[in-house]
Amino acid sequence: MSVKTLEILEQLKSLTLNETAQLVKQIEATFNVDISTPKLIRVDKRDEDEVQPQIQTEFDVLLVSVPPEKKIALLKVIRTVTGLGLKEAKDFVDSLPQVVQAGLDREAAEILKQQLEEAGGVVSLK
């Protein structure tokens, strides 16, 4: 600590309770801060968030690529899953990578991924 800081600290020790309360009010007004909220609570909450990682609950099924020889089989699956017509499904597969379905729970996403992979597609979950 600097000498100036130590001197201020010694002066603060000599203040009465009433003088200290007035000083706190003046500091809050001057620096536009609220001293009544303990900062330790905010730090502890931030530490808890860092300790407990967020668990992903929604997944997007992304069709990355399709081998040319598996395209027809995959078109059938895409049409079934998305409800697209033949032309729309073909356009969908021709413009990969594409999200097949978004916001699925883990189990549904895994099932869809398995269906697409069985048809020959390369799939990832995001």
Image (spheres, rainbow, N blue to C red):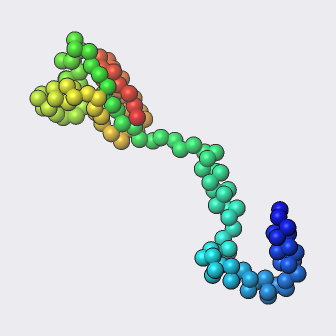
**Residue 46 in the image: x percent, y percent?**
62, 54
Q: Work out whether residue 124 or residue 76 is closer to the camera in this orientation and state it.
A: 124
In the image, 83: left or right of 21? left
In the rendered image, which quarter is residue 75 located in? Answer: top left
Q: Work out whether residue 18 or residue 31 is closer to the camera in this orientation and state it.
A: 31
Going 23% across and 21% down the picture, which residue do you hit?
A: 74
Up-down: is 66 above or below 87?
above
Quarter of the image for the N terminus: give it.
Answer: bottom right
**Of all residues shown, which one is farthest toward the top?**
69
**Residue 102 in the image: x percent, y percent?**
33, 39
Going 28% across and 32% down the picture, which residue do you hit?
A: 98
Asked if one can make out residue 111 in the rendered structure from this viewpoint, the answer is yes
In the image, 66: left or right of 19? left
In the rendered image, which quarter is residue 113 located in? Answer: top left
Going 30% across and 34% down the picture, which residue do you hit?
A: 99
In the image, 58: left or right of 47? left
Q: Work out whether residue 45 or residue 106 is closer to the camera in this orientation and state it.
A: 45
Q: Work out whether residue 85 or residue 9 is closer to the camera in this orientation and state it.
A: 9
Asked if one can make out residue 108 in the rendered structure from this viewpoint, the answer is no
Quarter of the image for the C terminus: give it.
Answer: top left
Up-down: is 110 above or below 119?
below
In the rendered image, which quarter is residue 16 located in? Answer: bottom right
**Residue 83 in the image: x percent, y percent?**
18, 34
Going 85% across and 67% down the picture, which residue do you hit?
A: 3
Up-down: is 25 above or below 113?
below
